[in-house]
Image: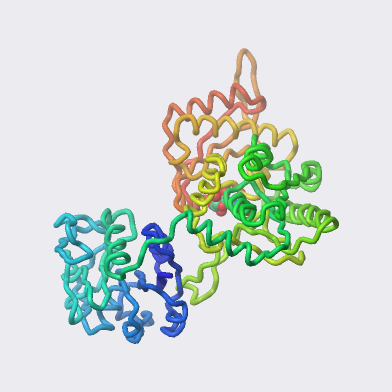
């Protein structure tokens, strides 16, 4: 792999994704890894990421100069660029000239910047600057605040840039990264969707042997792609279990039972647990309690289904759709895995005696989607927007009942339909529709007074759901949604728009 050494900024995973976009496999490693540990992973190149403010700061992570004596190509970015310059005998100075944000780069030849516009924008974020490149390096870029903004030594296969080539605000950044990987480090681009599928299929076959595996399908992208990969590897020896907890949106069960099965030919067992969830949720309106109940019931139902399968045949493996961002060790927490705190319905039943199969463990979400398409899954599944495990249960503010679920399901289906036909699916991250079931307001419809419930539209734009902005949907789309919901859904007489970003609001209301 290419190892991306994470110096604790938020950019390491993004760099790893960009390296993979150049069709080279990459992994993120914490900056606490020793040179021996890095070498043990047999890297084809090492990228030093951006990081804290200054190489002179107290506790600034250091780069061991021995790293540059291993014959491994190295690329430094921002902080990594400065740390590299310093380790190799260049000069890094407090010039006082800070640059943050969009900056004009003067680029001049070399391999990295050859034939790029002589002046072009890049994204900078630095206080200190490299004022003198190490010996043997050619300087190929500069900016007002960074006299040395890019250098390279083709002979040593080392290079670096002061700016952030990985972000979209550096329009030529991906090309620069590609040139380092392909032209300076000499790595052949082999990480393609087809190669990912081949490799994972081989691994799954090795791991499972002639055993059998169970996979819980949630209707989401990850479990669907994981299941499709395992199906490709072991065929009939995979059985998928789909729990209908009654908190699904309109059409979701069909999507799994009909579309997913048609695309993959997978063995599917559906458990209809709608009644069970409704009775467990009766009388409960506290959000955390709802989440606990849904999670607990889900595991029980899944365990029972697994037990029923076990009674007929031996199953040793459980398939999980864990993704790379959930397992990557980042520099910030000095080697601790960062695991999502959200509870995932479809999560691991703790006391089941299964070995885990996690075919997506090395993949980013965009790669998972491409693998899904490669495996022939329909667009509706592959590009499905995120939907929380506890489903509509946490989008009814108040007690969850069958009637309320039906109301919300109709309103949600209308909103989704209108957003899709307006071509807005790719612009929004997701658009929860929330039923304020304990609130009523007065309205007028036809000749009569109504006293119905409001629904809230919560359209958000986001990169990763950690932060989000409310989406400025066109008024005519909002109008169509509002008119249709109030006309077509009995009990709803008002549609309101949530214009809160995250933070301070979370995306879901509960
Ligand atoms: P919040 O509401 O925390 O949501 O801003 C962030 C993202 O996570 C989804 N979400 C969940 N997903 N299980 C999940 O699998 C959950 O319990 C859960 N709660 C929220 C939410 O839809 C959004 O995409």
Between 377 and 364, which is closer to the camera in this rendering? 377
Residue 118 percent across, percent down from the top left:
14, 57
Image quadrant in which you'd find residue 461: top left
Image quadrant in which you'd find residue 422: top left
The residue depicted at 60 percent of the width and 18 percent of the height is: 445
Residue 357 percent across, percent down from the top left:
64, 63
The N terminus, quarter of image: bottom left
Residue 5 percent across, percent down from the top left:
40, 73
Q: Is residue 164 visible?
A: yes
Q: Is residue 112 left or right of residue 30?
A: left
Image quadrant in which you'd find residue 452: top right
The residue depicted at 74 percent of the width and 64 percent of the height is: 316
Q: Is residue 167 left or right of residue 392?
A: left
The residue depicted at 61 percent of the width and 14 percent of the height is: 446
Q: Is residue 42 above or below residue 298?
A: below
Q: Is residue 141 left or right of residue 234?
A: left
The residue depicted at 27 percent of the width and 69 percent of the height is: 184
Between 457 and 392, which is closer to the camera in this rendering? 392
Residue 139 percent across, percent down from the top left:
16, 71
Q: Looking at this rendering, what residue extends furthest in the right direction? A: 311
Q: Is residue 283 above or below residue 5?
A: above
What scheme was used to colour the molecule?
Answer: rainbow
Q: Is residue 236 left or right of residue 323?
A: right
Between 330 and 180, which is closer to the camera in this rendering? 180
Q: State how many labels appear.
A: 0
């Amino acid at each position: 792999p290419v190892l991306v050494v994470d110096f604790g900024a938020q950019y390491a995973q993004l760099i790893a994704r960009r390296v993979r976009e150049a069709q080279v496999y990459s992994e993120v490693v914490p900056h606490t890894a020793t040179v021996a540990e890095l070498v043990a992973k047999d890297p084809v190149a090492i990228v030093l990421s951006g990081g804290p403010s200054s190489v002179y700061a107290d506790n600034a992570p250091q780069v061991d100069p021995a790293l540059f004596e291993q014959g491994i190509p190295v690329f430094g970015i921002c902080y990594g660029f400065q740390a590299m310059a310093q380790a190799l005998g260049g000069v890094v100075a407090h010039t006082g000239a800070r640059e943050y944000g969009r900056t004009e780069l003067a680029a001049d030849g070399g391999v990295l910047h050859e034939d790029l516009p002589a002046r072009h924008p890049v994204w900078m974020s630095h206080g200190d600057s490299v004022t003198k490149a190490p010996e043997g390096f050619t300087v190929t870029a500069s900016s007002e605040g960074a006299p040395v903004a890019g250098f390279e030594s083709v002979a040593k296969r080392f290079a670096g840039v002061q700016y952030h080539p990985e972000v979209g605000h550096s329009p030529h950044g991906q090309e620069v990264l590609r040139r380092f990987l392909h032209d300076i480090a000499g790595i052949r681009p082999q990480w393609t969707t087809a190669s990912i599928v081949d490799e994972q299929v081989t691994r799954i076959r090795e791991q499972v042997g002639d055993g059998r595996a169970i996979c819980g399908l949630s209707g989401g992208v990850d479990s669907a792609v994981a299941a499709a990969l395992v199906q490709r590897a072991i065929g009939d020896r995979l059985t998928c279990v789909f729990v209908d907890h009654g908190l699904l949106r309109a059409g979701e069960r069909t999507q799994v039972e009909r579309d997913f099965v048609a695309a993959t030919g997978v063995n599917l067992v559906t458990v209809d647990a709608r009644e069970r969830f409704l009775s467990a949720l009766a009388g409960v309106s506290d959000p955390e309690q709802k989440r606990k109940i849904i999670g607990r019931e889900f595991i029980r139902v899944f365990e029972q289904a697994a037990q029923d399968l076990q009674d007929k045949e031996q199953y040793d493996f459980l398939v999980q759709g864990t993704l790379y961002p959930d397992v990557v060790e980042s520099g910030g927490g000095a080697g601790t895995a960062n695991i999502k705190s959200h509870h995932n319905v479809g999560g691991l039943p703790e006391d089941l005696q299964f070995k885990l199969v996690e075919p997506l463990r090395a993949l980013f979400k965009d790669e998972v989607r491409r693998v899904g398409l490669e495996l022939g899954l329909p667009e509706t599944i592959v590009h499905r927007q995120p939907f929380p495990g506890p489903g509509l249960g946490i989008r009814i503010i108040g007690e969850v009942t069958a009637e309320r679920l039906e109301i919300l399901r109709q309103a949600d289906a209308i909103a989704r339909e209108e957003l899709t036909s307006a071509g807005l699916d790719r612009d929004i991250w997701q658009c929860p529709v929330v039923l304020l079931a304990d609130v009523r307001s007065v309205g007028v419809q036809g000749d009569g007074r109504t006293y119905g419930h409001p629904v809230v539209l919560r359209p958000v734009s986001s990169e990763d759901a950690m932060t989000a902005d409310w989406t400025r949907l066109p008024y005519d789309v909002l109008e169509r949604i509002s008119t249709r919901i109030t006309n077509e859904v009995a009990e709803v007489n008002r549609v309101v728009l949530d214009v809160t970003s995250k933070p301070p609001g979370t995306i879901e209301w509960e």
